[in-house]
Image: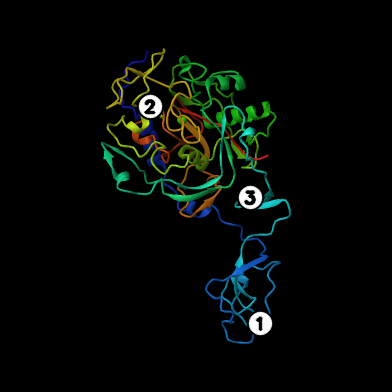
C-alpha cells in the first residue's frame, strides 16, 4: 500500500489545470476554423430570396434575362448591374432575386462535407445487427456541446465550480452514426492486442480499464486492433520511436512515455477502423441526449467529493474505494460520499449505463480523444475534428480520483500527448458506415 497522499483528490487535475492556465489560452482563430465551406467552389443552384418575392425587378427596368448561374461564378462576382439588378450574393431569375446557394456540385455517388470536399457517399448503418460485440450504436444527430452559463453554473463549493470558461455552448451536427465501445478499453483487451500491460493498477485485474498510456500509445493500439480485425488503420504515425507501454517504472503514477511520434495523421471520419472519438463525438455519446451536467441530472455538490447524481453512474473521488494491492491512499480526500482508505480503478461496466448503454463515461478512467485542445467555435459546426495543430490533446470524462465538479459531460481538459498518467485510458469508436 502507498503512503497517504498529501494532496486532495483533485491533485492531478489541479496540476493539469494549472499547467494549462499557465501555458496557453484558447486562440480566437479557433472561432473561424470550423465548418467553413471552401471559397473555391462552383454554384449551380438558386432559391427564392424571401425578402423579394413580388416578381418586380428591384430597379424598375425591363425584366432582365435570368443570369446563368454556374461555372466559375462566386458570390463576389454578382454585383448589382443592368445584367444583375440584385444584391451581391443573389441573381435575377423567375421574376425575383434568387439567393445563390453555396452548395457545391459533387459527382454522382459523392457528397460534400465541410473540410473534406466531395467524398464518397456512405451507407449508414441503420440496423443494430451490424453492431459488433462490446459496442453500441449511437445515431447521428444535432446537440448543444458545452454548457450555457446559468445560475447553477455559478454555484461554488470551495474552489469548485460547475462550468469552466472553455465550455462555450455551441451547436454541433454529427452526420454519421457511431459505433461506441460500451466500456473503456480493458487491461485484458490491451494485452490481447499489444502483448503487455502498461497499467499502474495491474492488481485491479484484466476487466479493469487500461491506464498509464499516452496519446500516441492509444493510437498505436487502435491501429494494431484494426489491422488484427481486417479493418483500415485510421492513423498514419510517422517518426515514431520506442515501444508502446515501455519506459515507465513500476509504481510511477506518471511518466514520460517510452513511445511517441513526430507526426500523427487521421485518415478522417470515413475510416472504418477503430479510432478515438473526436471531442464532439465523445460529449455526444456521454450525454445520450441529456442537456444536464450528467445523464442523471445536474450535479448538486454535497461536498468536494460528493454529488448524489454521480454515485450510481461513475467511479470518482467520492466512491472509488478498493481493497486490492497497490490501491492509492485516499483517506485524506475531502468530503467523500463514502469513507475509504484506498482508492483506484474498478472493473468496467459495473455502474448504470446512460441512455445509449454506454458505461463509465464520467468516471473510472478519463479518456483520450483525438482533438488538439483549443477554444470552441462560436458558430454551429458539422462533423468537427478539432484544430489542425496544437500543443495538448484533449482528455474527457472524470476518473476515480477526480472531484465531483469535474465529472460532467461538458468538462474538458488538456494533456501533453506524450504523458502517461494512472487515471487516463481510452475508449474505441468506429464510424458506423459500410
Ligand atoms: Ca471514463
Which residue does the numbered mark 3 point to in the structure image? 116
At a point 65% along the width and 76% down the height, the residue shown is 94
Mark earlier in primary sequence (1, 2): 1
Q: Give how far across and how far down residue 4 sits, in percent.
A: 31, 18
Q: Is residue 135 positioned above or below 164 on the image?
A: above
Residue 188 location, quadrant: top right
Mark earlier in primary sequence (2, 3): 3
How many neighbours does mark 2 have within 10 angstroms: few (below 14), some (14-19), or many (20 or more)?
many
| Disc 3 secondary structure class | loop
Q: What is the spatial separation of the Cα atoms under label 1 and label 2, in whole angstroms?
A: 71 Å
Q: What is the spatial separation of the Cα atoms under label 3 and label 1, in whole angstroms?
A: 38 Å
Q: Quadrant of the C terminus?
A: top right
User: What number is the disc on residue 64?
Assistant: 1
| Disc 2 secondary structure class | loop
Q: Give how far across and how far down residue 399 sits, in percent.
A: 41, 29
How many neighbours does mark 1 have within 10 angstroms: few (below 14), some (14-19), or many (20 or more)?
some
Q: What is the spatial separation of the Cα atoms under label 2 and label 3, in whole angstroms?
A: 39 Å
Q: Quadrant of the N terminus?
A: top left
Front residue of this view, candidates 396 and 121: 121
Mark earlier in primary sequence (3, 1): 1
Display colour scheme: rainbow
| Disc 1 secondary structure class | loop
Camera-nearest label, 1 or 2: 1
Task: Please tell me how many numbered marks the rendered image carries.
Answer: 3
Q: Give how far across and how far down residue 296 sits, in percent.
A: 39, 36
User: What number is the disc on residue 356?
Assistant: none
User: What number is the disc on residue 401?
Assistant: 2
Front residue of this view, candidates 32 and 91: 91
User: Which residue, as the protein is rendered here, is positioned at the far left?
Assistant: 158
At a point 46% along the width and 16% down the height, the residue shown is 204
At a point 41% along the width and 14% down the height, the residue shown is 326
Q: Is residue 397 positioned above or below 163 on the image?
A: above
Amino acid at each position: 500500500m502507498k503512503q497517504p497522499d498529501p494532496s486532495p483528490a483533485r491533485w492531478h487535475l489541479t496540476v493539469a489545470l494549472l499547467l494549462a492556465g499557465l501555458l496557453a489560452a484558447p486562440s480566437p482563430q479557433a472561432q473561424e476554423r470550423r465548418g467553413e465551406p471552401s471559397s473555391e467552389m462552383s454554384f449551380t443552384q438558386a432559391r427564392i430570396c424571401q425578402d423579394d418575392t413580388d416578381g418586380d425587378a428591384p430597379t424598375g427596368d425591363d425584366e432582365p434575362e435570368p443570369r446563368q448561374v454556374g461555372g466559375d461564378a462566386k458570390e463576389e462576382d454578382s454585383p448589382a448591374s443592368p445584367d444583375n439588378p440584385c444584391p451581391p450574393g443573389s441573381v435575377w431569375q423567375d421574376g425575383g432575386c434568387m439567393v445563390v446557394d453555396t452548395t457545391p456540385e459533387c459527382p454522382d455517388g459523392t457528397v460534400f462535407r465541410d473540410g473534406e470536399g466531395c467524398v464518397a457517399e456512405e451507407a449508414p448503418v441503420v440496423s443494430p445487427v451490424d453492431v459488433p460485440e462490446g459496442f453500441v450504436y449511437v445515431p447521428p444527430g444535432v446537440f448543444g456541446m458545452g454548457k450555457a452559463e446559468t445560475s447553477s453554473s455559478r454555484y461554488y463549493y470551495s474552489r469548485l465550480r460547475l462550468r469552466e470558461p472553455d465550455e462555450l455552448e455551441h451547436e454541433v451536427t454529427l452526420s454519421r452514426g457511431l459505433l461506441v465501445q460500451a466500456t473503456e478499453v480493458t487491461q485484458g483487451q490491451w494485452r490481447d492486442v499489444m502483448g503487455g500491460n502498461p497499467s499502474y493498477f495491474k492488481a485491479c485485474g484484466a476487466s479493469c480499464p487500461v491506464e498509464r498510456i499516452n496519446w500516441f500509445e492509444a493510437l498505436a493500439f487502435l491501429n494494431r486492433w484494426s489491422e488484427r480485425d481486417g479493418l483500415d488503420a485510421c492513423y498514419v504515425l510517422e517518426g515514431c520511436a520506442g515501444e508502446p507501454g515501455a519506459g515507465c517504472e513500476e509504481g510511477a503514477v506518471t511518466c514520460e512515455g517510452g513511445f511517441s511520434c513526430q507526426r500523427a495523421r487521421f485518415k478522417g471520419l470515413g475510416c472504418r477502423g477503430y479510432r478515438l472519438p473526436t471531442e464532439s463525438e465523445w460529449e455526444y455519446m456521454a450525454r445520450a441526449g441529456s442537456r444536464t451536467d450528467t445523464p442523471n441530472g445536474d450535479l448538486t455538490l454535497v461536498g468536494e467529493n460528493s454529488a448524489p447524481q454521480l454515485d450510481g453512474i461513475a467511479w470518482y473521488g467520492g466512491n472509488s474505494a478498493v481493497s486490492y494491492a497497490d490501491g492509492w491512499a485516499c483517506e485524506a480526500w475531502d468530503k467523500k460520499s463514502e469513507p475509504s482508505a484506498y482508492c483506484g480503478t474498478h472493473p468496467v461496466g459495473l455502474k448504470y449505463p446512460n441512455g445509449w448503454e454506454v458505461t463509465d463515461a464520467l468516471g473510472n478512467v478519463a479518456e483520450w480523444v483525438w482533438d488538439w485542445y483549443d477554444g470552441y467555435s462560436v458558430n454551429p459546426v458539422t462533423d468537427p475534428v478539432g484544430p489542425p495543430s496544437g500543443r495538448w490533446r484533449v482528455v474527457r470524462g472524470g476518473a476515480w480520483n477526480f472531484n465531483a465538479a469535474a465529472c460532467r459531460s461538458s468538462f474538458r481538459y488538456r494533456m501533453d500527448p506524450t504523458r502517461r498518467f494512472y487515471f487516463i485510458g481510452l475508449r474505441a469508436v468506429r464510424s458506423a458506415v459500410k
